[in-house]
Amino acid sequence: MNFERTKRRRNSPDITPLIDVMFFMLVFFMVFSTIKTEPMGLDVELPRAVTGSPQTSTSFEVLVDKSGVFYVSGRMVTGTELQQQLTERLRVNPDIFVIVKADRDVRYEHVVDALDHVRAVGGYRLGLAVQQND
C-alpha cells in the first residue's frame, strides 16, 4: 500500500508588503516626532538684569552670537545686509524699536558694532535684551 500524504495548500495572503509598510510608518513617525515644534531661532543666553521690562511695541531684533555674527529673522547677515534690512523697515515705520539680543559671552566690541550699524541708518530707539531675574 502506497500512502501518500497530500499537503493542503493554504490560500493565505502574503504579508511581506504589509510588514514593509508598517516598518516605513514606524520609522517615519519616529523621525518626525523628534522634530522640535518650537520656533526656529538661535540659542543665545541673555545677561540678567533687575530693571528689564518686556517690550510689546513693533520691534526689529538683531541677534549677536558668541562669535560676533549678526542674525536677523534667524538668518545670518553681514553688517551691510543688516543696515539694508533695517533701512527697509525704517521706511515703513520710522519709530521702530530695535532690540539687540547679544549672548552674555559675546565680546563688547561686537555689541557696539551692531549698535553702530543700527545708528548708521537712523535707528534711534534702541534697547539691549536681558532676562529678568526671578
Image (spheres, grey):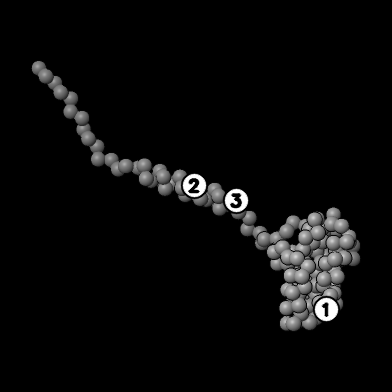
Q: Which of disc 2 and disc 1 is earlier in sequence?
A: 2
Q: CA distance from mark 1 to mark 2?
A: 54 Å
Q: Amino acid at mark 3?
A: Thr
Horizontal side of 23 relative to 86 (left or right) equals left
Residue position marked by numbered label 2 in the rendering:
26
Q: Is residue 25 above or below residue 75?
A: above
Decide: few, some or many residues near mark 2? Use Cα within 10 Å; few <14, some 14-19, many ≥20.
few
Which residue, as the protein is rendered here, is positioned at the far front? 80
Task: Give the crowd class for mark 3: few <14, some 14-19, many >=20 residues within 10 Å.
Answer: few
Q: Which mark is residue 34?
A: 3
Instruction: Please report the residue visible at 80 percent of the width from the left and 55 percent of the height from the top.
Output: 66
Amino acid at the residue labelled 2: Leu
Give the camera-side residue of 104 and 51.
104
Residue at position x 60%, y 51% in the image: 34
Furthest toward the top, the residue is: 1
Residue 129 in percent (x, y) is at: 83, 65
Q: Residues within 10 Å of mark 1 (few under 14, many from 20)?
A: some
Residue 10, compared with residue 133, is above or below; it is above
Rendered residue at 80%/69% (across/down)? 99
Total numbered circles: 3
**Residue kind at label 1, given as amino acid type:** Gly
State the CA–CA distance, disc 2 to disc 3.
13 Å
Per the image, the residue denoted by label 1 is: 122
